Amino acid sequence: MSWELLLWLLALCALLALVVQLLRFLRADADLTLLWAEWQGRRPEWELTDMVVWVTGASSGIGEELAYQLSKLGVSLVLSARRVHELERVKRKCLENGNLKEKDILILPLDLTDRSSHETATKAVLQEFGRIDILVNNGGVSQRALCVDTSLDVFKELMELNYLGTVSLTKCVLPHMIERKQGKIVTVNSVVGIIAAPLSTGYCASKHALRGFFNTLRAELTSYPGVTISNICPGPVQSNIVKNALTEEVTKTTGSTADETYKMATSRCVRLMLVAMANDLKEVWISDHPFLLMVYLWQYMPTWAWWLTNKAASRRIENFKSGVDADSSYFRSMKKKHD
């Protein structure tokens, strides 16, 4: 075989590999590293069994679905949120459909904004189960309002709940994990912790802050390789996050009942989260296109990302002012540009 033919074959193989990766990306609902881990990596059913997992924001949405899927893996669950009756409902369903017994689930009411209670809550978990293997920081609230119309109290509430509350609870659990030299801290962030989303200035700020905090914390923990930090960045997922989102006043939520069928199924998002946890992935992006594409653009081609964001933002703000569902219209606008 001549060198010229060999080079042609290598070039052809490289081209085919590029085409395969492009096709994979066009069908992707998560970053390629996560999808590779789902295909070839460690399985949650192998890695997470018998662990003690503390989930905040467990009364609805991603946290609720996470509780259901974890209950089938044979873990010990700590379910935290402010609404005790909703936690009781989630616990009942875990017992009905999972592989757990009554003693395996602890309901622990928790208000992330009440930082003085976090140390006591942590001690309660340790007293009940003796250890904390995984802390899932999932509690939080979103926002839908223009910055110029939004009370400063809304920004304070978003930072108190989404950022400072999460940091406070993490700081309470972290010494225990450092002492044991093992543990996983998993934080449900958002793709808007990477990109920009108009009508969510306070929410985006809190999520950017979380990403910066946990990336830096990971760097500080290099002496403890058994303590891992994972940032989970979902895109639009079917949940009540928009319905419960704050508006221009801290006492007012959107109450939105808009169609959410265009969003990713919560069960798929949580399954990918479990894969990320099992494989100790540092950061994962979980989203359908076009938001997944936007995250890649923000990461690698920010000038193009800004151009697309500005184009879609004008339509989103216009629809918001006219009373049209801003989220679904924004999605359709972004998808049109993607297609």
Image: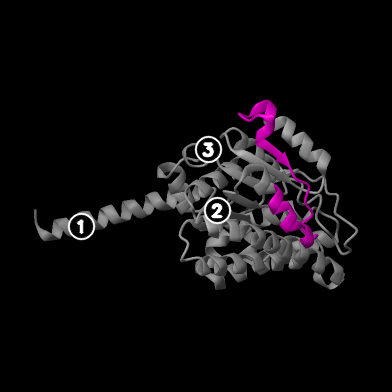
N-terminal of the pair, mark 2 or mark 3, is 3
Q: Amino acid at mark 1?
A: Trp
Q: Is residue 102 one of those drawn in magenta?
A: yes
- Secondary element at tag 2: strand
Q: Position of residue 229 (x, y in %)?
A: 54, 58
* Residue 299 horizontal/vertical position (percent): 53, 67
Query: In terms of secondary structure, where does tag 1 sit?
Result: helix
Which residue, given by chain and number where applicable, does mark 3 sit on? 49
The image quarter in which residue 100 lies: top right
Q: Nearer the viewer, mark 1 or mark 3?
A: 3
Task: Point out the stretch of residues depicted in magenta.
Answer: 95-124
Residue 266, horizontal then vertical, whole percent: 65, 42
Q: Is residue 55 above or below residue 98?
A: below
- Residue in front for this viewpoint, 245 or 128: 128
The furthest residue to the left: 1
Which residue in the protein does label 2 denote? 184
The stretch drawn in magenta includes residue 259 = no
On the image, the x and y values in percent for residue 68 come to: 65, 36
Q: Quadrant of residue 315?
A: bottom right
Which comes sooner in the sequence, label 1 or label 3?
1
Residue at mark 1 to residue at mark 2: CA–CA distance: 47 Å
Mark positioned earlier in the residue sequence (1 or 2): 1
Q: Nearer the viewer, mark 1 or mark 2?
A: 2
| Near-viewer residue (134 or 204) | 134
Q: Is residue 163 visible?
A: yes
Which numbered circle lies on residue 8? Answer: 1
- Residues 312 and 253: in front is 253
The amino acid pointed to by label 3 is Thr
